[in-house]
């Protein structure tokens, strides 16, 4: 007879249910195959030292569920039918796509956008989560305030005031799932208000453009030069809202100059415009204190967006918008009508992490780490990639390296990839019209590699650049 492997825990009771569960597991795992003949209820009862009624009940249950078939004269067998709760077999996996240029595994990940993920403060985050959960009243586990937990909005208002010279209070802060979410929600509200044209810097983050397009606004691209966005060019567009990265333009790394800051605010006042300030990595400035945010200059005309994606980890998906109170109320309603708010426990965890001072301590440590990495990398690029020019100020977690004239950006990226380097070309970040004239450049994220690795990566990049020179 088939060895049925039906472990029973007599102290747990419900023996018929346990026998039935054992059979189901055997069928699902494929151990008991269709057509297998089962022992009679009398024999099985004896083997298992249970009453016959227990086995009869289990067999009846399994027959009703379709696992077993019982025929007079043929005994009881495992059903030949498809198993009732079996998922259909998965389709065969498609063959892995061929990788052009047979890319070797990445040894040096310089793809921009991530902080040092190995530095995520796991223990401190866990401690903050424990403390938050312990203190969380039961009521807080109901549907949350769609604008965000008051405790987090309060902590964020304090932090943004201290660290970014923002003008905030809890009523102006809306918690979101990253800055991307705030941007998507906000753009939809703007469109509903008739602000259907949004000005965006050129170049800009390739990650954000599809989100903005999906929100149904028309994008106009406004060039960026060594002082930041060209406000005179902005004023010539029909946009009444603009998305900017004043503290550290993405990707070029320039800081919006004091004159441009003033003229941008003047534009907003004259044109009844709204400035959306993406403050994505402003905590990291290495040559001086970060420039205060624009929102602090005119909180009625500027919306400040931020998140923990560059300071802790993008996977946390926690961000915020500091907005004028009427817009905060509308964002809150938008959340109520679209997703009922951000998960509560991570909000309380971040609030606790801020309250304890841990977040700002972490930022100080990361600032030291990233400054050392940037210095080492920029220096190594100067030595190993002659003719390359690093743009912008020492800040953030990426740098923009213009390649020597005559370099073919795509070829350099492909060569680098074959050498085990993951790097992003800058061309996709420009509008099609300007991309054709933009000097070849790379956007290099350095936060996740130690200095020694960055020096080696610069050396390999130098070889890729030499090989990628045209002609
Ligand atoms: C310019 C810019 N701002 C902000 C973000 C961060 O978005 P989030 O906070 O949703 O992670 C990114 C992400 O790549 C970005 O490129």
Image (cartoon, grey):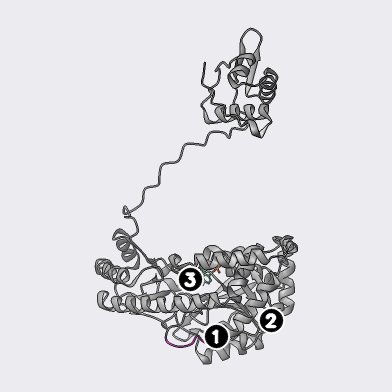
**Mark 1 or 2 closer to N-term?**
2
Q: Main secondary structure of the magenta part?
A: loop
Image quadrant where residue 145 sits: bottom right
Q: Which residue is drawn at 60% across and 70% down?
A: 350
Marker disc for residue 431: 3
Marker disc for residue 231: 1
Q: Mark 2 points at which residue?
A: 169
Q: In this view, does 251 lie above or below 44?
A: below
How busy is the neighbourhood of tag 3: few (under 14 within 10 Å), some, or many (20 plus)?
A: some
User: Residue 21: horizontal and vertical position, in percent?
Assistant: 62, 30
User: Residue 287: horizontal and vertical position, in percent?
Assistant: 42, 86
Quarter of the image containing the C terminus?
A: bottom left
Q: Mark 3 to mark 1: distance in Å?
A: 17 Å
Q: Is mark 3 on a helix, strand or loop?
A: loop
The verdict on residue 197 being magenta is: no
Q: Mark 2 to mark 3: distance in Å?
A: 37 Å
- Asked if residue 172 lies left or right of residue 22, the reply is right
Image quadrant where residue 294 sits: bottom right
User: Residue 148: horizontal and vertical position, in percent?
Assistant: 68, 69
From which residue to which does the magenta span run? 287-292
Of residue 50 and residue 204, the one placed in the foreground of this image is: 50
The verdict on residue 291 being magenta is: yes
Q: Does the residue labelled 2 lie within 8 Å of ligand 1?
A: no
Q: Which residue is drawn at 63% across and 74% down?
A: 321
Q: Would residue 292 be seen by someone viewing this image from the given angle?
A: yes
- Of discs 2 and 3, which sits in the foreground? 2
Q: Would residue 177 be seen by someone viewing this image from the given angle?
A: no
């Amino acid at each position: 007879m088939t060895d049925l492997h039906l472990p029973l825990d007599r102290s747990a009771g419900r023996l018929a249910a346990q026998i039935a569960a054992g059979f189901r597991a055997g069928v699902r795992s494929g151990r008991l195959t269709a057509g297998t003949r089962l022992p009679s209820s009398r024999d099985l009862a004896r083997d298992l030292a249970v009453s016959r009624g227990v086995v009869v009940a289990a067999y009846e249950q399994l027959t009703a569920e379709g696992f077993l078939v019982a025929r007079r004269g043929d005994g009881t067998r495992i059903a030949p039918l498809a198993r009732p709760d079996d998922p259909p077999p998965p389709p065969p996996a498609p063959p892995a796509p061929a990788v052009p240029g047979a890319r070797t595994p990445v040894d040096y990940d310089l793809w921009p956008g991530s902080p040092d993920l190995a530095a995520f403060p796991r223990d401190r985050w866990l401690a903050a989560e424990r403390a938050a959960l312990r203190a969380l009243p039961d009521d807080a586990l109901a549907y949350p305030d769609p604008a965000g937990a008051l405790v987090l909005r309060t902590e964020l208002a304090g932090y943004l005031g201290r660290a970014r010279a923002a003008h905030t209070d809890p009523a102006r802060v809306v918690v979101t799932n990253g800055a991307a979410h705030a941007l998507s929600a906000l753009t939809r509200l703007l469109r509903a208000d008739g602000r259907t044209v949004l000005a965006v810097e050129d170049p800009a983050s390739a990650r954000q453009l599809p989100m903005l397009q999906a929100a149904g606004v028309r994008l106009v691209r406004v060039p960026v030069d060594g002082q930041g966005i060209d406000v005179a060019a902005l004023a010539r567009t029909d946009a009444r809202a603009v998305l900017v990265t004043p503290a550290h333009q993405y990707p070029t790394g320039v800081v919006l100059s004091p004159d441009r800051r003033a003229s941008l605010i003047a534009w907003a006042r004259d044109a009844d415009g709204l400035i959306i300030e993406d403050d994505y990595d402003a905590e990291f400035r290495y040559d001086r204190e970060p420039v205060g945010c624009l929102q602090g200059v005119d909180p009625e005309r500027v919306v400040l967006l931020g998140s923990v994606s560059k300071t802790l980890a993008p996977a946390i998906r926690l961000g915020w918008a500091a907005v004028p109170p009427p817009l905060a109320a509308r964002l809150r309603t938008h959340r109520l009508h679209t997703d009922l708010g951000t998960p509560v426990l991570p909000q309380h965890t971040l609030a606790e992490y801020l309250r304890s001072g841990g977040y700002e301590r972490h930022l100080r440590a990361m600032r030291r780490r990233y400054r050392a990495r940037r210095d080492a990398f920029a220096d190594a690029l100067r030595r190993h990639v002659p003719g390359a020019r690093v743009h912008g100020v020492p800040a953030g977690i990426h740098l923009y390296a213009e390649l020597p004239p005559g370099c073919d950006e795509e070829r350099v990226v492909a060569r680098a990839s074959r050498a085990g380097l993951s790097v992003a070309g800058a061309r996709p970040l420009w509008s099609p019209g300007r991309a054709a004239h933009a000097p070849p450049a790379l956007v290099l994220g350095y936060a996740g590699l130690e200095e020694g690795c960055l020096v080696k990566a610069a050396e390999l990049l130098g070889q890729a650049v030499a090989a990628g020179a045209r002609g």
